[in-house]
Structure formats: structure tokens, C-alpha cells
Image (tube, helix red, strand yellow):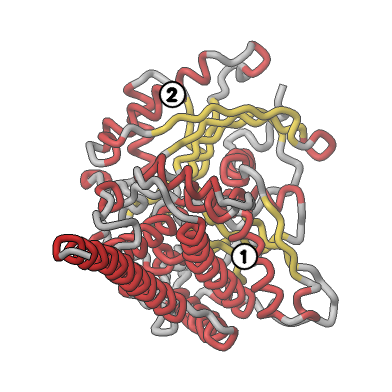
Amino acid sequence: MGKVAVGAAVIGAAAVLGVAALVVRQRMKSSGRWARAMSILKEFEEKCGTPEGKLKQVADAMTVEMHAGLVSEGGSKLKMLISYVDNLPTGDEDGVFYALDLGGTNFRVLRVQLGGKEGGIVHQEFTEASIPPALMGGTSDALFDYIVEKLAKFVDEEEQMFHQPPGRLRELGFTFSFPVMQTSINSGTLIRWTKGFSINDTVGQDVVAELTNALKRKGVEMRVAALVNDTIGTLAGGRYTNNDVALSVILGTGTNAAYVERAQAIPKWHGPLPKSGEMVINMEWGNFRSSHLPLTEYDHALDVESLNPGEQIFEKLTSGMYLGEILRRVLLKMAEEAFFFGDEVPAKLKIPFILRTPEMSAMHHDTSSDLRVVGNKLKDTLDISNTSLKMRRVVVELCNIVATRGARLAAAGILGMLKKMGRDTKSEGGGKTVIAMDGGLYEHYTEYSKCLEYTLNELLGEEAASTISVEHSNDGSGIGAALLAASHSLYLNEKSS
């Protein structure tokens, strides 16, 4: 063999060795990246851990905060707001009533026809509208004018059969799902906005007066008969059909809970005791916090960058507005530190709140063998394509970690309420306790709601769990508001025509 041939052979062998070395280096690089991604996942899973012992500590802390909040205003992270609802619907309510349900980025207008003891809910219909983002940070007048315009359109389209008798005003229950310091059944001042709203000139104002002024400006003749939180509306709606309903929980964009308390167990109540001896308490439990909550670096960063840093910590762990965002933050860290989606960090993954909880839920529920829903969601939402099955499985695992922590903490919160009510053990009388649940997260994120109910049974134990049941109170907040308008009507003693 000549020198040239030998040289070519050597060069050829070196090239092969070079390619092999490159492949080995890429594999090492790849396996190193994968190992880093797995360590991020493992650490996150450990930090999100909710063993039974920890959940019981969270429940006990919830009970302690409930007691403190009932003693004095500002005595607890839980507002424990007095709702002035001391009579829940009985089923005797009669007539046509309206509800306006402002609970987040959407609002609904409802009309409910009640037929008394025999008729129940004879007819109901609603329309829904979303609030333009500009109005969520604009002025109070602009927001309420927009809402009343939609309400007026709904009333104008109603059939002849729903016209009120002469001299009788239409009456409305106003579900306003933000922290309000209530001063009567139909007045209350806004403490602060949550869920992405920041309209400064509404804070400290009576929201019923704001709505009433907008009704006057738009020429709509209607009286606001009851101001209720969505959680109290859900409680009222649940009680209308089931007398065992004693507490309600909303798990949607945000989260909250309400329950029926003995009036004598509310030291900060200074008025005459209600005839019923009971008072519905709006807990505002989204603001609950405790050293026992399993917080991660992602939760701390989300909180610091939020519109309300230091507030609504429980809500930021459990509710629909935030679950997808927590997932995005973990995926972003994997992309930045472990090049999980390739050498480039996907640009869209850097956008806060781009990954919404409905997308997370769809990925979590993907049962296809190749997890194609996960692949499609990553591509459509984040412009991340060509993901491997192994990567898609990691995404599903992260969805599971985030949703499981949220659901188990919500169950611990419910256990805390049951403890405060003395309903966490089987009673002598064998009475039942029903929890009315509502909200898009609970209704649509099946893995979340299944986990919540399983965890609640686990925490209660078999015997106590047999006396507690969870019922989906569909659209409870809207119908409940109409029912509370009916039970607080000016025309209670008049028979509807």
C-alpha cells in the first residue's frame, strides 16, 4: 500500500472515530441533560409532598385561623366575613327573580322563575359575557356600565310572561365574588380585587351602590335585593334542594368557602342575635396561609410577581388561575437548565400565564398511547414541536404533581371546616353533612376533583366519611343569588301574579 493510501486510510479511520466520539459526546450531553431534568422533577415532587400528617396539620391550622377570624376583624388571615344571610332558602319562594354573577373574567345574567313549595324552579335561563381586559384595570363606572348594558339587553329580550306586576320592581341578587365587607344583606364595601382585576376607584366603595348608579345611568328599573358571594350563592342553591347542605366550596378561577355557623360562636357579631340562631360566614379562605403549606421556589416566584404579593397564598396553590402557571414555571426551568426542549428555550414558554389550567387538564387527562393531546397542546400553546414520548410523559407527571398537591390541600381545608363545625366525626344522631361544590376547576378537571374526594375520605376515615358527601351544585352561585333575592324580597307577603 502506498503512502497516500495509508494516509487516506488513517484519515478515514480518524473521521469515523471523530463521528463516533461526537455521537458519544452528544449522548453524554443528552443523558446529562435528561439527568438534570429528572433531578428538577424529583426535587419539585418532594417539595410538593402532601403526606397525611402534613394535611392534618394544615386542617388544624385552618380551624385555628377560623376561630381567630370570628373573634375580631383582622384577627386572622381569614376574613371570616359576616354575610347577613341568616335565613337560607326554604323552598317556599315564589315569583321571577334575576341574578347577576360576577365571579372572574366572565359574568352571567340569570332569570329564575320560582313556583313555591310545589313548583320549585319552574324556568331558568341565562346569558354569559366576558369582560374585556381593558375594563379589568379601568374605572368603576366603565366596568358597571358595561355589565348593566348586557343586563338591560337580557331584560329587553324577555318574553311577555316575565313582565312584573304593575308597581313592582324587578329584583336582583348580585353575586360578587371578591372580598367585601358586608354591612347589610344588600350593601358591602370592596376590600380588594383578586383574580386579575385592579380597579382602584372601586376599592372601599359600596359595590351595590356602584351597580345601582349604573342601573340608573342606563335607565334599568331594578332593585338589588341581596349582595352575595358566589360561595354563599352556592350554599343557598344547594340548601334549596337539600336540607343537609351546611358548607360550600368554590374551586374555579379562584377559590373560597362558606358555611353555616352558630350565631353565638361569633364573638365579633354585635347586633341582636338572628331569630334562626345561625349566620352564614364567608371565609375568604383563599387568603389562608400556614407554615405547613408545601411551598416551592416556583410558588414564591409566582407570588412575588403577582398583582397581590403575599396575599391569597392558599388560592395560588389550589385554584384554576394558577395551576397552569406553576406548571409553566417548572417547564421553563427544565428548558433553561436542562435544555429539555432542545438548545433553544422556547420563546412562548417565557410568557407568564400562557399555559392555562384547561390546557394542563387536557394534557393530564390524555389517555392516548402516544400522548398526542400533550404533543398537540405543547405545539399549539407554546410552539414546541417534535417532542418525544418520554418528554410528553414527564409533562403529564408534572401535571399530576401540581394538580394532586392542589386537590389534597383543598381537601385539608375542608377537613379544617368540618372540625370547626364539629362534623369531622360520626355523630350520635347519624346526621348527614353535604358539601355543595361548584366552579370550573372542580367541574371539568376530573383528576383534580377525584383526588380531592379521595383525600377527604382518607383524612376523615371510613366511619366519619360515611356521613359526609360532596354534591356538585351546578351553577349554584347564580341560582343561589336569585333565591336569596327571593328570600329577601320587598314583596314577600304579596302573592306573585
- In this picture, is 200 found above or below 433? above
Relative placement, left or right, of 308 versus 4 is right
Instruction: Say what amino acid the circle numbered 1 marks.
Output: Val
Where's residue 64, x and y in %?
A: 49, 83
Where's residue 308, x and y in %?
A: 27, 60
Q: Residue at x 78, y 37 (%)?
A: 120
Which disc is residue 260 wearing?
1
Say which label, 2 or 1, has the lower sequence index. Answer: 2
Which disc is residue 150 wearing?
2
Regarding residue 445, the answer to whether it shows in the image is yes
* Real-space Cα separation, disc 2 to disc 1, in angstroms: 33 Å
The image quadrant that residue 494 belongs to is top right
Q: Residue at x 54, y 27 (%)?
A: 127
Where's residue 162, x and y in %?
A: 64, 18
Q: Residue at x 21, y 67 (%)?
A: 10
Q: Residue furthest front?
A: 1
